[in-house]
Amino acid sequence: MPKLKTKRAAAKRFTKTGTGKLKRNKAYKRHILTKKSTKRKRNLRKAAMTDKTNSKVMSKILPYM
């Protein structure tokens, strides 16, 4: 069995926590920020965990993480 390659784009976007979950940043914080409320922008700053339904796909994309 050959070595599996890590998808580098995904490796740059996700980090693994101590419990093994994947941490990600939230979307919609790059531009067109004037119409978004301060509360919404503040909540977009916080990191989020990836959904449980994506875990199977993520393990294929990030085999060594």
Image: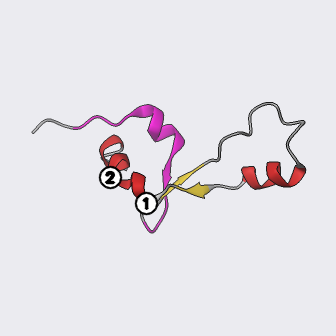
Residue depicted at 85% across the width and 43% down the height: 36
- Left/right placement of residue 47 relative to residue 40 reads left
Residue depicted at 38% across the width and 54% down the height: 55
The circle on residue 43 is none
Q: Is residue 45 magenta?
A: no
Q: Which residue is mark 2?
A: 56
Please tell me which residue lies in front, 6 or 55. 55
Give, as a single range, the part of the protein colored magenta: 4-19
Amino acid type at circle 1 is Lys
Q: Position of residue 64 (x, y in %)?
A: 32, 48
* Display coloring: secondary structure
- In the rendered image, which quarter contains the N terminus? top left
Residue depicted at 23% across the width and 38% down the height: 4
Res 32 → quadrant: top right
Please tell me which residue lies in front, 18 or 27. 27
- Left/right placement of residue 16 relative to residue 2 reads right
- Left/right placement of residue 52 relative to residue 26 reads left
Q: Residue furthest bottom?
A: 19
Rounded to the nearest angstrom, the CA distance separating label 2 from label 1 is 8 Å
Q: Position of residue 24 (x, y in %)?
A: 56, 50
Q: Position of residue 10 (x, y in %)?
A: 46, 38
Q: Which residue is mark 1?
A: 52
Residue depicted at 60% across the width and 57% down the height: 48
Amino acid type at circle 2 is Lys
